[in-house]
Amino acid sequence: MQNQLVIVLDFGGQYNQLIARRVRECSVYCEVLPYTTPLAEIRAKNPIGIIFTGGPNSVFSEDAPKVDPSLFEMGIPVLGLCYGCHLMAQTLGGAVSPAPTREFGKTPASFDTACALFCGLPEESIVWMSHNDFVQTMPPGFASVAQTEDCPVAAMANPERRLYGMQFHPEVNHTQNGVEMLRRFLYDVCEAKGDWTMGSYSRSTIQRIREQVGDGRVLLALSGGVDSSVCAALLSEAVGSRLTCIFVDTGLMRKNEGDEVEQAFAKKNIQFIRVDAAERFLSRLKDVTDPERKRKIIGEEFIRVFEVEAKKIGRVDFLAQGTIYPDIIESGTGNAAVIKSHHNVGGLPDFVDFREIIEPLRLLFKDEVRQLGLDLGLPEYLVWRQPFPGPGLAVRILGEITPEKLAILREADAIFREEIARAGLERSISQYFAVLTGMRSVGVMGDGRTYDYTLALRGVTTTDFMTADWAHIPYSVLETVSTRIVNEVGHINRIVYDITSKPPATIEWE
């Protein structure tokens, strides 16, 4: 890639991906690298700027992450955030100490608007603080350019060396004008050109795939999710009919989803194979109630079905996967912490005879993948499809999976999603879905006693899906959803709404 690059050095902070997304929202390409990345590797990448993330450590603890001090002598602008600010101060000769008064949450701050980071912004606004330590003594050549009531160095600057530190988090929505502060660092300090757009990425990636594939054939397992669908659309533009997509319909998808996926690719110049494997999956899941066993069975069965279909095709030259950038980050790079392992990262399937793997989305965040999908002409219902677990409705039915339970949940979930869309809330709620619990309770319908299922509704708001708050859906919407489901879907006589955040709960129930 020929784009200008900003490197985000990760010190274990919870906002590492969010920082990178904010940079890309400013049309500047960036990559997240572990703090252990050798200086030579950083230099070889020729970044126009470096951002240090926050982190859970204290700079004066024994195992505190460090960087090579020579990094600050490279002449590259550096912005340290929270722990990154402390690390910069300590490394360059300042002093960091436990704060007399810790600050957490929204905090009023005042700014020196002569500083490049705050030029043209209000002299006072709200920032998001989260710290136990503070910069007690700034390094030589630095000046305080922002303060709060309890933090005399809420931001510091050495404009001659183009080194800046912020005690607060500009990347979160709670910090007023935070993205503008980052934008000023990128454009006024790093002199970014803003050459990162989905249009340019799409054109360069299509050209690169054509050169890589030549006259070879590509195989893709199409799940119907956003990532694999956008991957398919991009590959279809690059290689056309030499792309074969195998769509395994497990029978565990939401209402009409299988048909919608097939319809979305009906006019594409590709080989599209839809495998109806519902009976096969349900047979394997009969009498299974443990969620981990469900996941394992579904994963194994998907591989077996895909293997059978792939062998019918014969040799393929390239296997494509819808791996995206968060998969790479979360699966760990170097000494970075492994948050969770992803099936697309670290291992390749051994049941398909292929020469090479293609992952055309591996540099993109989810919001960028969606934008690319729209640019490629995919329908909005597919691009903005709600996040859906790999095992599908099998882990949204507590207990045994049966065709009857699947039918009940499909209809109830569809009503929930319809009413959320009708209320105009589909973009403000990160994820929402219905769960068919294994619990039955007594009810009264038509003057008669019922003993039917309890359905749970779940809605969350989140930026990274690692933490989440329950969504405050208006009571009027929940009332409409409840009334419709009880009246239109059989065997449900009670609706509950899950108001638990993550943690302590997870987003999914299983």
Image (spheres, rainbow, N blue to C red):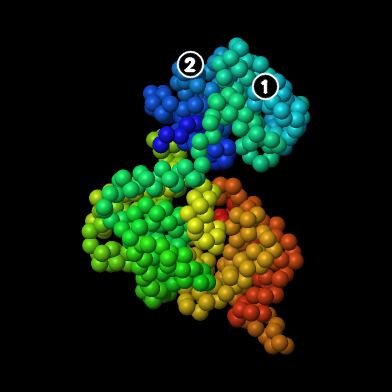
Image coords of residue 28 (percent x, y): 53, 35
Nearer to me, 165 or 26 = 26
Q: Which mark is residue 115?
A: 1
272 is higher (above) or lower (below) than 82: below
Q: What is the x, y in percent for residue 333?
A: 41, 38
Question: Circle 2 is placed at which residue position?
Answer: 73
Q: Is residue 232 visible?
A: yes
The amino acid beneath tag 2 is Glu
Q: Is residue 13 above or below residue 477?
A: above
Note whether residue 296 is visible.
no
Quarter of the rendering containing residue 328? top left
Per the rendering, the mark at residue 380 is none
The residue located at (47%, 78%) in the rendering is 403
Q: Earlier in the sequence, mark 2 or mark 1?
A: 2
Dot 2: what SS?
A: helix
Q: Residues within 10 Å of mark 2 (few under 14, many from 20)?
A: few
Q: Between residues 88 and 379, which one lies in front from this camera angle?
A: 379
Q: Quadrant of residue 109?
A: top right
Q: Are marks 2 and 1 in contact (CB under 8 Å)?
A: no
**Residue type of the residue flagged with mark 1:** Cys
Residue 195 spot, x, y in % from top left: 51, 36
Query: Relative to residue 479, is residue 288 drawn left or right?
Result: left
